[in-house]
Amino acid sequence: MIINRTTLSNGLRLVHCQLRTTQMVAVNVLYRVGSRNETPERTGFAHLFEHLMFGGTERYPDYDGVLQQAQGDNNAYTTQDYTNYYIMLPAKNLRLALDIELDRMAGLAFTPHSLEVQRKVVMEEFKQTCINQPYGDVQHLMARLSFGTPTPDGQSYVCRHPYSWPVIGLELSHIADATMEQVKDFFHEHYRPDNAILVVTGNVEWEELESIVFQTPPPALPKGREWSHHSDSHFTPSPWGGQGEGSGMSGRFQSVHRPVPQPLLLMSFYIPPRKDPDFQACDMLSDVLANGKSSRLYHRLVEEKRLFLSVDASVDGRLGTGQFYIEAIPADGISMDDAEAAVWHELEALQNDLISDKELQKQKNKYETNTSLYRSDYQRLAEQLAFFEMLGDARWILDDIPLYQAVTAEHLRDVARRIFSRENACVLHYLCDEDS
């Protein structure tokens, strides 16, 4: 895999990788702005802009329509750390995709109509996902529990840390009350070429891409606005969790009752940022616990002991402190305390005993196979290259699988001992109303 990189005069980073196995290209633009760039008094703006960016420009008022005519497709998503937009279309139409993508970077059309339309869309999504469905407030509860600042009485938590609210926003009113001036300020602060990464993958040569990009006048920086990249310093003072992040975290527990069909056990543990050398071990531990029916939590707690109806484990690798999640639905008749105790028992086993060479190699093989297959898709490869470029260098993608292959059983045990402690845990018992 040959990866080309350069930085334009306006600070826009350009990354390229040619794939001759397709006649398509992917144009991926990652903006280094997510919910972490919001304030507690004004949340949900990054997600709102994911929608507003499809409102078009003066030159291309019908963004989706132009792409459809060019046999293209597009979409976007927002995370806590970044927002990602991508276009897929035939390679012959690459110039059009680059033109409209750079055009909306230079001058998004801000109209009252567009704002009101997208505001309603985002508010309806908030209602459907967070208010009007079972378990809809889980993300809010876990984010606040994990990264919120305790109140003086210790009975609740205040959202101050940028990871203490979910991407969709803290409150519906923050989007409902958003003004055009606030929206424009957010755009000019974050949707800038020097805060963006443009990745092109597929059937296009580097020289052709360079000729197109350098023939197109690059988007200029907004006049009269100083810019410096968002600092990560207050996100990662400690490699293990939030104790150093001004949140006063030291083992947290909450129990709530909701009108849901089944109770839910949620456990999270602080893990180091994505760039940390221990991240691969954290990720592999989640696979050991819950990747497939032969994984430890599923095999032992679902199939053998019948303590759970379902169980899952995952990691959220971030620019700042990440999280290791365990989510499980206890079987009928199993108390939440017994369910939690069973999970702790499995976590303690990882801290006390080395996993076998066979189990370790199985997880390494799975990761290599799944990752290689995932990146064989030109659009997914573009997303991954943009992500690694955000971390520091798109070429780090070449080291990713070797880093996973280098993880040892001793490393996994060492990391498990540091992660899976009571002091590093946030536990939520999400109970049915009838259990109260």
Image: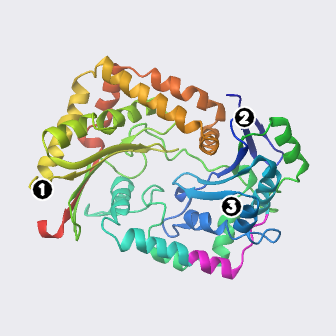
Residue placed furthest toward the right: 215
Packing grade of label 2 (10 A; few <14, some 14-19, many >=20) is few
Q: Is residue 113 above or below residue 28?
A: below
Q: Residue at x 39, y 69 (%)?
A: 130
Q: Where is the N terminus found, in terms of image quarters?
A: top right
Residue placed furthest toward the top: 357
Number of the front mark, 1 or 3: 1
> What residue sits right under mark 3 in the picture?
189
Packing grade of label 1 (10 A; few <14, some 14-19, many >=20) is few
Q: Residue at x 22, y 71 (%)?
A: 259
| Sequence-wise first label, 2 or 1 | 2
**Which of the 4 image quadrants contains residue 413?**
top left
Q: Which is nearer the eye, 281 or 303? A: 303
**Which of the 4 image quadrants contains residue 414?**
top left
> What residue sits right under mark 2 in the picture?
20
What's the distance in space between the residues labelled 1 and 3, CA to CA? 51 Å
Taking the image as shown, residue 287 lies to the left or right of residue 273, namely left
| Sequence-wise first label, 1 or 3 | 3
What's the distance in space between the residues labelled 3 and 2, CA to CA? 38 Å
Task: State the extent of the magenta-drawn residues as a range.
Answer: 107-119
Determine whether the residue tagged by mark 3 lies in a helix, strand or loop.
Answer: helix
What's the distance in space between the residues labelled 2 and 1, CA to CA? 53 Å
Image position, residue 205 (x, y; %): 80, 36
Q: Is residue 349 above or below residue 311?
A: above
> What residue sits right under mark 1 in the picture?
332
Q: Residue 214 magenta-drawn?
A: no
| Amino acid at circle 2 | Arg
Packing grade of label 3 (10 A; few <14, some 14-19, many >=20) is some
Number of the front mark, 3 or 2: 2
Check residue 340 in the rendering and tell me which mark sits there, or answer none.
Answer: none
Q: Where is the C terminus found, in terms of image quarters?
A: bottom left
Q: Residue at x 43, y 48 (%)?
A: 245
